[in-house]
Amino acid sequence: MRTSEIAKRYLDYFAKHDHLVVPSASLISPNPTTLFTIAGMVPFIPYLMGEQTPPKHRMASNQKCVRTLDIDEVGKTTRHGTFFQMLGNFSFGDYFKEEAIHYAWELLTTPQDKGGYGFDPEKLWMTTFTDDEEARSMWKNEGVDPEHIQIMGMEDNFWTTGGPGPGGPCSEIYVDRGPAYGVEGGPIADENRYIEIWDLVFENYEVDNVKSKTDLHIVGELEHKNIDTGAGLERLAYLMQGKQNIYETDEVFPVIEAAERLSGLKYGEDAAADVKFRVVADHVRSALMIMSDGVRPSNVGRGYVLRRLLRRTVQAMRVLGVTDPVIPELLPVSKEAMAPSYPELNDTFHDVSEAAYGEEDAFRRTLENGIQILDVAVRKAKETKDPVVSGTDAFTLHDTYGFPIELTLEMAADQGVKVDEAKFRELMNEQKSRARADALKKRHNVDLNVYDDFKKTLAKPIDFLGYTDMSARAR
Ligand code: ATP
């Protein structure tokens, strides 16, 4: 089943159960504390907090998300994308735990020819919060094998906003990929064999004094209890399409195929190269989606995240042996794969691609300047027992050749070499202090000069005309 069909089934299912289906909000988060929309619930926060009245008390969406927190996992685990789509059904003071559990179970286990996802109930596992006996008994009532219901603590299975407000236990649903993928014993034992697909949050408490996930005060029960759920579309897709990971699904894999053609290498033959193929496919898609929502490369905030995604793509392709421009080859492929679900990509692509190609050109110039210096530094490091690029070399690369430290770190890591980051930071701080001192000196000089001129003016005798020339007042 194609990814778009999996999304459609979800939204159709919840529409049938009286949910208002709304389109995805932008990736640019409306919440000032995060750069991007990181979960399906983000656009619904005012409804969940009771600050605004929702257009309907049951809603559902397929929300575009970006999580930069997961960037180092990309390509290495089977399940983390920087961009991904989160399906979600929400109840704002309407249905609660029992219905949320029932809906999830029904959609997952109904056969595909009857509109569901057709997961084998024997392969589904749940985690529940320590105190949430109620959720455990509800899962059992649905027919879940009691052995497949595990208990987890506050850290994993209790949700809060991070501050005072709604909070509550959650229950996560996992799919067992089978003994070939790890040890038995449920998600508690092995999160790579048992893949988390859906998280159901039961917001029934008001909490305050939230010092950490495990140190908070439950004020009492909320008057209006909410349901907030999130299911990873790419994770559902990879499991339902019988693939090994999210990067091999229909909306992502075409970029891997394009990278194979460009590099002349085959995906699936070398573990280290495969990670790079997956990074490329993930990052190209994330860059495309972020740019389509209006972000452009820059040195701050979202623009910097985007810049890193594009640069990491170029860099990963270099490791695969491709030194010619790659973005003009890869970006249109990702656009073709995503446009059936996001037709607006066809309208934004002209501007998006121009900006992305320009960014690659600029990066290639940076690389041309610094790459030999880096190669020498890496070679020098490799001659020692514990190969580390010196902080001084990393600083020169930054200061003279415009290599951000992340780039030096990543390029050195590609060659199995570390970087003395502590020394680099020390040199950066020294440079900053020097610059501050210079600026201060300059400011004082300027002040003094101005003051000198002022004094000279004052030294001249001033003729007071006020008694004789009344118009002087108006001057
Ligand atoms: P994990 O622990 O596996 O990283 P999570 O606990 O951070 O996942 P939630 O915040 O509960 O995930 O998000 C809800 C759902 O969204 C998850 O069950 C998963 O299916 C999906 N999801 C979360 N992060 C990612 C990601 N980086 N890439 C793809 N899907 C994701």
Image (cartoon, rainbow, N blue to C red):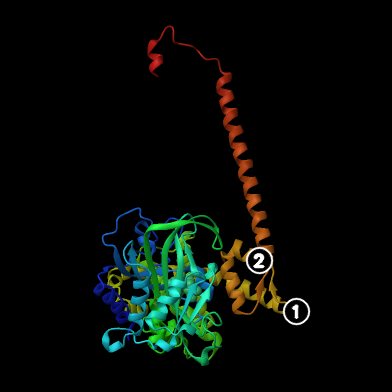
- Name the residue type under label 1: Lys
Answer yes or no: is residue 310 visible. no
Ligand 1, by image quadrant, is: bottom left
Q: Which residue is mark 1?
A: 385
**Which mark is on residue 149?**
none
Kindly indicate the quadrant of the structure image that contains residue 252: bottom left
Q: Is residue 135 left or right of residue 390?
A: left
Against 76, is 120 above or below? below
Give the residue drawn at x 55%, y 82%: 190
Q: Secondary structure at mark 2?
A: helix
Distance between mark 1 and mark 2 Cα atoms:
18 Å
Q: Quadrant of the C terminus?
A: top left
Give the residue drawn at x 41%, y 84%: 238
Disc 2 crowd rating (10 Å Cα; few below 14, some 14-19, many 20+) is: some
Question: Of marks 1 and 2, which one's residue comes earlier in the chain?
Answer: 1
Q: Is residue 308 left or right of residue 425?
A: left
Whether the residue carrying mark 1 lies under 8 Å from ligand 1 is answered with: no
| Percent coordinates x, y for residue 356 in the rendering | 40, 69
Answer yes or no: is residue 379 visible. yes
**Which mark is on residue 421?**
2
| Percent coordinates x, y for residue 223 in the rendering | 37, 56
Disc 1 crowd rating (10 Å Cα; few below 14, some 14-19, many 20+) is: few
Of residues 221 and 210, the one drawn nearer to the viewer in this rendering: 221
Of residues 430 and 301, the one drawn nearer to the viewer in this rendering: 301
Q: Is residue 444 left or right of residue 223?
A: right
Against 363, is 255 above or below? below
Q: Is residue 441 left or right of residue 298?
A: right
| Percent coordinates x, y for residue 371 in the rendering | 58, 73
Kindly indicate the quadrant of the structure image that contains residue 281: bottom left
Of residues 429 and 134, the one drawn nearer to the viewer in this rendering: 134
Q: Quadrant of the N terminus?
A: bottom left
